[in-house]
Amino acid sequence: MTDIGWVPGDVHGRTVGLGTALLDTPLVAPSAELAPPLMEARPLPDNNPSSSTGGSSSASFDNSSSVAGRVAQNSFFERSARAGFVVSGIVHVIIGYIAIRIALGGAAGTADQSGAMAELAAKPGGVIALWACVVAFGLMALWRLAEAALGSSSEPAADSRKSEAIDRVKAAGLAVVYFAFALSAFGFARGSGKSSSGQSTGITARMMQTTVGTIALIAGGLIIIAIGGYHVYKGVTQNFLEDLEGVTSNLVRRLGTVGYIAKGLAIAAVGLLVILAVSRSEPDKAAGLDSAFRTVGAQPYGTALLIVSALGIVTYGLYSFAMARYTKM
């Protein structure tokens, strides 16, 4: 965005020629013919507050979008935030790998972000990778927080105030998610990481002891299902292409379509399990993504279903690598 200032111009084209005209004019009282141009060259300021309201609103919007643009397009900030997509892709690929390992009866592990970070921590150089995750997720969260506060720099001309408000709410939600990822990575980098599945179960059990908590859990489950449905919708309609800049290949479109649908179904399954956990008074069912995968694996043909679900999450991880390159910022 560019701030536009008012620059006075030569109203009558006499700025240069006025001095010459005065030198050629006899020293007599100024005639009435000269007065009107001089008066017209000084536009009166508009002091009417009502007429400036729209301009002030537009200027305020331009200023906020300009600030958002400067934040997002700072070279260090942009590269670091884009690295967050790479880290997110790695986490999704590891989650999918753990889910496939569970389906095939392999070594134990939790198929969620905490399990992925525990997997990283156990590898040589894993602690360094986790500290990189902390920085990348933290900057991703700050980027989304800037969008929530200042508006998106990539879409400054929102269709309506309602559309802009929705975009800001989504950005705020993503900021919370990335801050949670950064905090989880921080815990595992320090050697004090905890399973998110266990934490979810404990929180659910405590909330189920009160009526207000039970209502909140059901509402939360419905919201999670809605978020999952939105991911599915975004994949089916390929609406995610609006978030990308430049011309995308067929491979990127296919990765995004499959990835969003698979992740949406997984998220919706988590929300459904939360509601089932409340209705059956079984808090263990509300254990997050890992519980959703294990529930899928326990169904008829569960092994095949779990592998397909896991491959979908891996596909979303691969699409995250494309987002690191093409996402509008």
Image (spheres, helix red, strand yellow):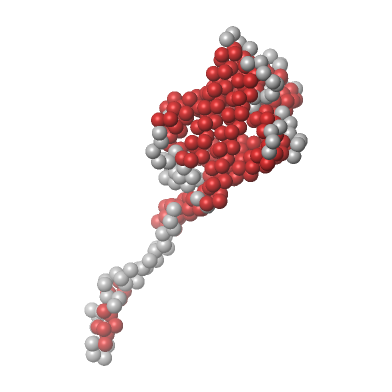
Quarter of the image holding residue 308? Answer: top right
Name the residue: 55% across, 27% down: 314
**Residue 229 placement (x, y as % from top left):** 51, 24
56 or 50: nearer the viewer: 56
Question: x and y percent of residue 269 in the render?
Answer: 59, 20
> Which of 107/323 is in front?
107
Q: Does 247 appear above or below 100?
A: below
Question: Relative to residue 308, is residue 252 drawn left or right?
Answer: left
Q: Which residue lies furthest to the front in this view?
A: 124
In the visual, does 275 lie left or right of 18? right
Residue furthest to the top:
300
**Residue depicted at x 56% and y 51%:** 76
- Name which residue lies at 67% across and 18% down: 106
Front residue of 328 and 217: 328
Q: Where is residue 328 in the image (x, y as percent from the top left)?
A: 47, 42
- Identify the residue at horizontal 68%, vertical 24% (top origin): 110
Which is more toward the observer, 190 or 266? 190
Q: Is residue 135 visible?
A: yes
